[in-house]
Image: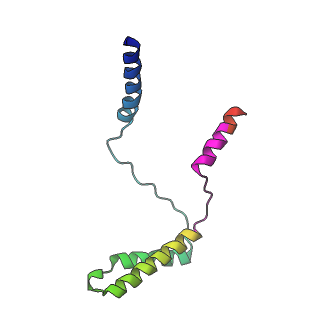
């Protein structure tokens, strides 16, 4: 019984301590990346900001639908132009296991 209590308290300590010990009181400053954005992407981003700042309360239902469709298309286009390497979590785990084993 004493052994189970000790193991339980030890597990509880490992679970609680990292959450409280490493908690930060302040939010970190956002990281700003200074990458050059292509002109066509910048035009799309400007259009998104223009739509967001627009007063949509005066628009009709059809106009609102058209704006939503336009926003979706713009966002799809911006995402498709975003290049990079994406690795899934499973692939990372497999790579780490292979590194450990070898």
Can residue 47 be seen at all in this image of the molecule? no
Looking at the rendering, in which quadrant would you find the C terminus?
Answer: top right
Q: Is residue 32 above or below residue 55?
A: above
Give the camera-side residue of 9 and 38: 9
Give the camera-side residue of 30 and 98: 98
Give the magenta range: 82-97
Q: Residue furthest left?
A: 57
Q: Residue furthest right?
A: 102
Q: Confirm whether the magenta stretch covers residue 81.
A: no
Q: Residue furthest front?
A: 1
Looking at the rendering, in which quadrant would you find the N terminus?
Answer: top left
Q: Is residue 20 above or below residue 57?
A: above
Where residue 71 sits in the image (x, y, percent)?
Answer: 44, 77
Give the camera-side residue of 6 and 33: 6
Residue 23 image-quadrant placement: top left
In this figure, what is the number of numbered marks?
0
Give the camera-side residue of 6 and 28: 6
């Amino acid at each position: 019984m004493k052994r189970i209590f000790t193991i339980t308290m030890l597990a509880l300590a490992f679970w609680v301590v990292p959450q409280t010990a490493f908690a930060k009181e302040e939010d970190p400053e956002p990281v700003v990346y200074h990458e050059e954005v292509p002109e066509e992407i910048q035009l799309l981003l400007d259009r998104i900001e223009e739509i967001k700042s627009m007063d949509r309360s005066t628009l009709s239902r059809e106009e609102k639908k058209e704006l939503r469709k336009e926003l979706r298309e713009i966002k799809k286009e911006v995402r498709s132009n975003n290049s990079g390497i994406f690795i899934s979590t499973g692939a990372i785990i497999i790579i780490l296991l292979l590194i450990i084993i070898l």
